[in-house]
Amino acid sequence: MHYPSPSNSHHKLYRFHGGLHLPDNKTQSNGRPARAAALPKRLILPLQQHIGEPAHPTVAVGDRVLKGDVIARAQGLISVPIHAPSSGTVIEIGEHPVPHPSGLPAHCIVIETDGLDQWGELPEPIMDFSTRDPATLRQRIRDAGIVGLGGAAFPTSVKLDPRQPVHTLIINGAECEPCITCDDMLMRERAEQVVAGIAILRHLTGAKSCLIGIEDNKPEAVTEMTRAVASSGQEGMEVISIPTLYPSGGEKQLIRVLTGEEVPSSSIPASIGIVCNNVGTAAAVADAVLQGRPLISRYVTVTGEGVGEPCNLEALIGTPVVELIEQTGGYSGRISRLIMGGPMMGFTLHDDSSPIVKASNCLLAASAAESPDPGPALPCIRCGQCASVCPVRLLPQQLYWYARAKDLEKAQEYNLFDCIECGCCSHVCPSHIPLVQYYRSAKNEIWAQEQEKRKAEQARKRHEARLARLARKEAEKQARLKKKKAVLAKKPAGKAKTGAPDPKQAAIEAAMKRAAEKKARLAAEGATPRNTRQLTEAQQRQIDQADARRQAAGKAEAHTEKPVAEEQE
Amino acid sequence: MQFPTITSPHTARPNSVTRTMLWVILALIPGTVAMTWYFGWGILIHMVLATATAVAGEAVVLRLRARPVMPALKDLSAVVTALLMALALPPLLPWWITVIGVVFAIVVVKQLYGGIGYNPFNPAMAGYVLLLVSYPVDMTSWVPPEMLNPHPLDPLQTLSLIFTGQLPTGLDWDAVTAATPLDAMRTELDQNRMISEIRQSPLWGDFGGRGWEWVGNWFLLGGLVLLYKRIITWHIPVSMLAGLLVMAMLFHFIDQETHPFGLFHIFSGGTILGAFFIATDPVTASTTRKGQLIYGASIGVLVYIIRTWGGYPDAVAFAVLLMNLSAPTIDYYTQPRVFGHRDQGDE
Ligand code: SF4
Ligand code: SF4
């Protein structure tokens, strides 16, 4: 370790397999203090900035909104509301380019700002949080629209409601990706606020121990945070400087480094009594609880050889990327691509009119030298370098082999879904194979198949219901006919009236019963396809998100489907 | 403004196949110089000849398979195959035998299986074995090391001998060639002589055949460079040498007079070259760490078995090819325990 840190001289650290020592390229952007970005003319707010159900607009075009007003409400449990980052008028609700790996446009609310930046009414600050009911605080956090700001964007209030008791709260200040410095600057400049947020998180989780992990390439942040923790008087809260090694900021990797524990595959940390939150999230929680302020801005690193003056900006959510670039010296002429996130895991933006969203930590305007075209891929030479750097201890060369051959069964057998897409394997591959891309598309394909299966299942159900309905109608008709006949024949009220079983109806009922039993048996045998069983929560979330998107896209279809589905009941 | 989109990671890649192969070639230099010093110019002539044949052969096959030629040649893997094979061939071997071996290695063993990355067998070793079984006499006629050579040949004489079979006047074939120490040891052991007797001969140095023992050191130096540059990892070379050494010491301990001591095996024949440059060929070796240990150790044990009880004096090529066959199976059974999984064995 390069930097001495007084606080963790006694804390035992563990290591994870593999990982990379990357040139960190952080000094370009962390040399000057962060400053507030200028108020943009227009703010573009995607309805889906989080994992889960998209928010539902509560404003209409033409409405005037004040800063902090809710403009879209949460739908469902895994969802959060969206707030107006500044005062102005809603001028459009529609499709707009958004920062998303798919590159597809999505639904956004567009606000034309009025320059007044006038606050609306905010909820009361809660200063005595330690005496409050956790549910109240969680509600506040949800109402403030807070999601994980480290990149995952999972609603924080849900994460803070674990079903298992929590013994350790881990705060992620590792910021292991090269180039990104927003958490670094936040910890340096607002350590008190971060620590105040951590105290609230700790109260909510009931965690005895609280470990704040920061990579040792951020000595100033370590110092500031150590000081803030000491002056807060929190017991059992420790700032720990960890060796710089990508991807130590991965949730499961950080937990391993700090506690030596491995979160079981396809489980969340809470299953072993740990909850992990990012430092930015902690700061946002402090704002929400102690000031009643919703999540409407965040620190964003703007860096790379493609911009004039790399630095950190505190930008309103919804600010178009191009405006941030303009405030950091504009494009330098060496720009070759625009990356949202870091060089290892970020994705390229096609259009710089896309806005900053809650999960946007970095804008990397990369030059051709920083992000060269890797050139055509050669065949895999089975050198195993990918395997030796994989933090999950996968065999990327085997995964690649099966992903490429579209042998999805085998790919899953080699634990495709444990891959965290960190990019270490692609980075070292001498054959320049875009390995991560293969894994992503294999996962997508499996999810798509899942989707197909689910659809087919629904169709089958609908079909069964229809058959049953027809059979019922037919049976009723027959019964009516019989009754009529019986009446006509003026025979003494016979079989039908005494309720003796009608053979046809009995046959139908028996058939339906058999079908139901078969279904129940299948369900009991666990006939769910293996790949859904192996999904981690994060993947399930992603599927849900994809589902949600699809539903949003195909509303018409949903409408026609619903009545049928209801009829079934 | 709009930008091109690609997938992550967006970094300059530090690594390439060309770079890997280039380091292998550089690491061969010390051993090559030593070989030339002890065994004459024939080594260099065969290297040039083999390289030219390999590059030309690969270009022709790629053209026939309608594949881009330049990217494949640029990866330098054909050159590495050619150089490794040339280092294993007797320095005065007739030129056409080298050509046959290299063409077989590149065209059949490598390209017909799909080119780099797809060949199940190490091309250089497969080519070598083909020549060994087809031309056993030529393939075992080595030259004596420089200090024991009464008639060292100059470059021109060597060239004419290789290409025309023309010996310098006054010399016959027996005068310029000699058996390798491994061969000699074997022949004499077959005649029931004791090792202590055999080692009286001037052929022997401190721990191996004279000349040979030093060549091994220089290849070892190159191997250490590869380790340092992380082109290879220690697993295969160390386990292979350990496997061979353990076997050799065990039998030497049982009977000192019929089983040469361990270091003899390490510094004879192609052991060091094999351990650092041939068994480590990524394409045909095991790729899991545990698998590499098994793979290397098995090669070491096999080398000993074949050298001691098999029909051929040197055995690296056979042992490597045999283990090439087993590599996929070894890999399958030695998968590392994935993070967060507890069922499979440990790392
Ligand atoms: S690093 Fe690339 S070439 Fe090497 S084994 Fe992995 S995928 Fe194959
Ligand atoms: S991207 Fe996946 S396979 Fe590659 S190193 Fe990271 S976790 Fe391993």
Image (cartoon, coloured by chain):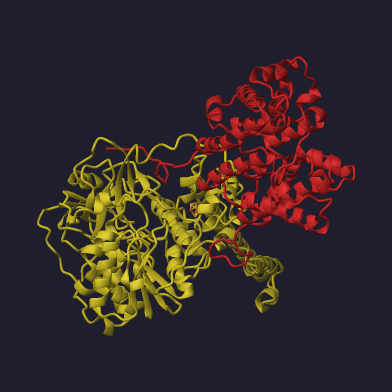
Residue B288 picture location, percent across and down: 61, 53
Residue A474 picture location, percent across and down: 62, 61
- Report the quarter where the N terminus of chain A lies: bottom left
Residue found at the very far right of the displayed protein: B191
Residue at 33%, 73% (x, y): give it: A7
Give the quarter the ligand 1 occupies.
top right
A356 relative to B45 in the view: left or right: left
Question: Which chain is in red here?
Answer: B
* Image quadrant where residue B179 sits: top right
- Residue A72 shows in the view: no
Frontmost residue, B39 versus B16: B39
Residue at 42%, 54% (x, y): give it: A551
Frontmost residue, B7 versus B77: B77
Question: Which chain is in yellow here?
Answer: A
Frontmost residue, B115 versus A320: B115
* Image quadrant where residue A284 sits: bottom left
Vertical order, B181 against B63 (above or below): below
B303 relative to A244 in the view: left or right: right
Residue A182 picture location, percent across and down: 27, 57
Vertical order, A270 against B9 (above or below): below
Residue at 23%, 70% (x, y): give it: A193
Residue found at the very far left of the displayed protein: A116
A355 relative to A435 in the view: left or right: left
Residue A46 picture location, percent across and down: 30, 53
- Residue B6 shows in the view: yes
Vertical order, A476 against A64 (above or below): below
* Image quadrant where residue A174 sits: bottom left
